[in-house]
Image (cartoon, rainbow, N blue to C red):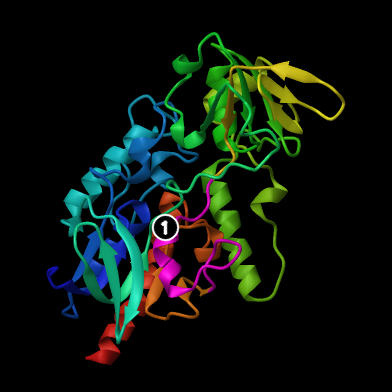
Amino acid sequence: MGSSPKRVDVAVVGGGQAGLAAGYFLRRARRRLEFDFAILDDGAAPGGAWSEYWDSLLLFSPAGHSMLPGWWMPEETGQEYPSARHAARYLSEYERRYDLPVHRPVHVHSVEREADDLLLHSGQGDWRARYAISATGTWRAPYVPDLPGRGVFEGRQAHTADYRGPQEFAGQRVVVVGGGNSAAQILAELSSVARTRWVTLRPPRFLPDDVDGRALFSIATRRQEAAERGEDAEGISDLGDIVAVPSVRRARDRGALRAEPVFDRLTPTGVAWADGTVWECDAVLWCTGFRPALNHLEPLGLVGPDGRVKVEGTRSVDEPRLHLLGYGDWTGAASATIIGAGRTAKGAVAEVVRGLEQAK
């Protein structure tokens, strides 16, 4: 017979940037209200998804605009934009700095209702909580479009989540699929060691060189505030899609970032377009994004056909004991960024604490 579930007032699922931001505000709230909480993280070590990105990945904002609440990210020596490794170290130190109650590795595979609580099941034991905050992000749910021929291509297919560096593709012919920042940064370095072709659904649009994550966050915030007033406002997509970090600027200036329409199908040895054009290649790298990692919420019946949960702010409409953090603009302006995660976590925790106070 299994052991009884561990009991906490608030369980946070995920120990990356959004989960740690929630932990900061929960810890601060305990100064005036007695309750306990736990952060359940399935990673083997601190750092969230940043510890799993490829080495050369750069953030889109300087360190001074990439901070969680309470502590600014230190600058990285010699870097205008911090690296993924620097971000992972920052999250690791942040966790220690605030002595956050992170339990790892704990993989929460399902959440269900049980009377007045939510019951979280994991391979490392179960947890019972009055409130749950889901902050699992998107890294565990890579998306690959179902284009014809994916199953017959005999070369290598990899996703952004699998990419570690250009040397594994050195001397090969590689098709990079996707028109976002990851595709541009990866192509910038791949094109120096491999023969590459870049294919996108629509022509890629580079942001002006003086626009980075600072401006993008401000735009996202203004757009959300306008939407709440029933007004329209400029969106990020009105400016462009790709932040011109230094590596991207250099590759663009040497003509390595020329895109063409996405192919129509894969063949056993390459890719083919409807006009009869074919290109033999060794690998296809899908830089096609991610979806919210919400499999653990399926028992609650909240995840819609679009892969999202209906929310008001960050709170689930159909399960008010559940909040969602860090999945994109639908859970708060720029909430999938480091700075945005902190701002949306503040409001989510405030709602949770009000609920705990009312139950006292």
Q: Amino acid at mark 1?
A: Ala
Residue at 44 percent across and 58 percent down: it is 326
Q: Position of residue 270 (x, y in %)?
A: 68, 21
When the figure is inspected, residue 262 is found, relative to residue 37, above or below; the finding is above
- Place of residue 116 in the rendered image (x, y in percent of width and height, measured from the top left): 30, 86
Badge 1 marks a residue whose secondary structure is: helix
Residue drawn at (64%, 69%) of the image: 226
Task: Give the quadrant of the N terminus.
Answer: bottom left
Task: Please name the residue shown 51% across and 11% down the image.
Answer: 170
Query: Is residue 347 something that shows in the picture?
Result: no
Q: Quadrant of residue 99?
A: bottom left
Residue 9 seen in the figure: yes
Residue 294 location, quadrant:
bottom left
Above or below, 59 against 152 in this view is below
Q: Does the magenta-highlighted stretch encompass residue 326?
A: no
Can you say whether 245 is above or below 138 in the image?
above
- What residue range appears in magenta? 290-310
Disc 1 packing (10 Å; few <14; some 14–19; many ≥20): many
Dividing the picture into quadrants, the one containing residue 319 is: bottom left
